[in-house]
Image (cartoon, grey):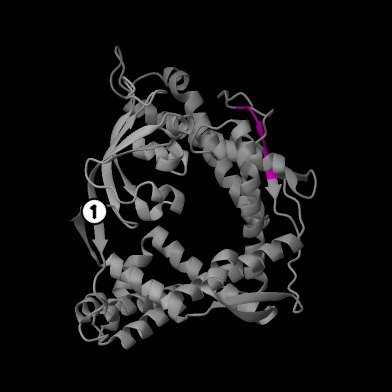
């Protein structure tokens, strides 16, 4: 066997693999002998089918299987030994498709296209400024959060007349141009959640009671075709072309009665005796909000830094090869046109992945399995403590952590989180990051 590589340009190369009979013939002959031992055909005793017939029946497939095995092993061993940093996987050259026939003497040549990772530099500038936004936890925000909690733990009760926050159940009937019920038109029982409507749409539905009727435009029923389709049992495409008005007849009105902020609610949320007053409750909410916004703030900071790094890091990618590779590995049948539509988004994700990997490598950022276990143990212990179990056996924590990390998706999530933490620590030392306190509304606008 002979393997050679020819660079086409800085990003693409061709690998040629020449395979001779000495590389494949002995294994193919062994496979055919195994077939002969097991073969059973009319007119021949088991295991006595002539070798020529076995070769005619199985020779081509046995050779193809052996070549596939040989090529796969040889190609990836060569890439590993030569320390080639590739993108995607090698692809058989489109115009190279040697005829597979077993004659015992033939030499085959297989040609593969290869995409190479680009060479580039990632620069961190100490003069580059970024902002970490810190949300101010004031009384207005605490009131809003506590009211949301009271409603979340509240109870639904039937009421006679619709109010601003009610859930209204009723019948939608399609009308014709004269305002009469359209024969064969749409009839659907569904709900309207008044709290989610804007003030104009909501005003038309306030003060209604059972059996009251109101005529609504499609735009007054829902804001988007997808939402309108859900309410009326239509596809988004059908809903987007709908122009008919609808008569909505109220059947029932339900209202959520907020829970009282008392000891019963505090115990239900945090466990008995953890929170014992409104003051302690608001202090607890302050901690929760700070934690929640801290995560959002860190994510925004990272996104801002990532965007800046991507903009400053210049390199090209072998677009034609990558599109061909995407087409080859697509799980669902795809067309070149579909790949072209998806490619820009894929390319940007790949650009950051290459930059990220280079940052990890150049700054010796690694996450060990022990670090992952300790991280999961901390999460599990925190969950135990939330339920009032402060004493947890370390051996039990370790067993739970190992079970979590045995699941591929969970393990990926854990390692991604730890890599994220280490990268943010690196940014903290390499870049100038300033803190700025903002109100909740301002943070929502910039986030």
**Disc 1 target residue:** 254
Q: Which region of the structure is painted magenta?
A: 105-114
Q: What quarter of the picture does the N terminus occupy?
A: top right
Q: What quarter of the picture does the C terminus occupy?
A: bottom right
- 269 displayed left or right of 308: left
Q: Please name the residue shown 48% across and 33% down the image.
A: 240
Q: In this view, does 39 lie above or below 30?
A: above
Q: Please name the residue shown 36% across and 60% down the image.
A: 407
Image quadrant assignment for residue 163 = bottom left
- 347 displayed left or right of 268: right
Within 10 angstroms of label 1, few (less than 14), some, or many (20 or more) residues?
Answer: some
* SS under mark 1: strand
Image quadrant assignment for residue 107 = top right
Q: In the image shown, does 113 or 331 lie closer to the viewer?
A: 331
Q: Magenta span: helix, strand or loop, mainly? A: strand
Q: Please name the residue shown 50% across and 66% down the image.
A: 416
The image shows residue 135 at horizontal and vertical percentages of 53, 77
Q: Decide whether residue 109 is among the magenta residues.
A: yes
Count of number-bearing discs: 1
């Amino acid at each position: 066997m002979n393997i050679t590589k020819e660079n086409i340009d800085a990003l693409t190369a061709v690998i040629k693999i020449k395979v001779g009979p000495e590389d494949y013939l002995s294994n193919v002959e062994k496979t055919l002998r195994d077939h002969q031992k097991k073969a059973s055909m009319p007119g021949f005793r088991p295991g006595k089918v002539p070798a020529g017939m076995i070769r005619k029946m199985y020779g081509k497939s046995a050779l193809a299987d052996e070549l596939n095995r040989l090529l796969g092993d040889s190609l990836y061993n060569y890439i590993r030994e030569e320390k080639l940093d590739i993108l995607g996987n090698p692809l058989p050259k489109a115009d190279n498709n040697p005829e597979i026939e077993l004659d015992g003497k033939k030499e085959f040549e297989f040609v593969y296209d290869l995409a190479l990772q680009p060479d580039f530099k990632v620069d961190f500038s100490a003069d580059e400024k970024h902002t970490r936004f810190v949300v101010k936890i004031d009384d207005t925000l605490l009131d809003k959060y506590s009211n949301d909690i009271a409603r979340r733990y509240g109870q639904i009760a039937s009421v006679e007349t619709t109010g601003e926050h009610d859930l209204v159940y009723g019948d939608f009937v399609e009308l014709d141009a004269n305002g009469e019920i359209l024969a064969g038109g749409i009839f659907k029982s569904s709900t309207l959640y008044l709290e989610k409507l804007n003030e104009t749409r909501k005003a038309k539905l306030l003060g209604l009671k059972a059996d009251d009727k109101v005529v609504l435009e499609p735009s007054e029923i829902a804001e988007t075709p997808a939402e309108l389709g859900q309410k009326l049992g239509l596809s988004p495409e059908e809903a987007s072309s709908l122009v008919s008005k609808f008569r909505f007849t109220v059947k029932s009105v339900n209202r959520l009665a907020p829970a009282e902020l008392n000891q019963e609610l505090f115990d239900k949320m945090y466990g008995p005796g953890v929170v014992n007053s409104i003051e302690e409750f608001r202090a607890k909410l302050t901690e929760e909000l700070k934690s929640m916004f801290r995560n959002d703030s860190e994510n925004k900071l990272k996104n801002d830094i990532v965007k800046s790094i991507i903009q400053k890091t210049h390199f090209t990618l072998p677009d034609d090869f990558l599109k061909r590779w995407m087409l080859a590995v697509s799980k669902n049948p795809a067309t070149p046109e579909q790949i072209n539509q998806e490619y820009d988004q894929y390319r940007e994700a790949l650009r950051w992945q290459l930059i990220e990997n280079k940052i990890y490598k150049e700054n010796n950022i690694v996450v060990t399995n022990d670090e992952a276990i300790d991280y999961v143990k901390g999460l599990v212990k925190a969950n135990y403590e939330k339920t009032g179990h402060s004493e947890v056996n370390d051996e039990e924590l370790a067993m739970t952590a190992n079970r979590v990390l045995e699941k591929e998706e969970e393990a990926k999530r854990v390692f991604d989180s730890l890599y994220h933490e280490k990268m943010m620590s690196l940014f903290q030392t390499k870049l100038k990051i300033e803190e700025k306190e903002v109100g909740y509304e301002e943070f929502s606008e910039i986030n």
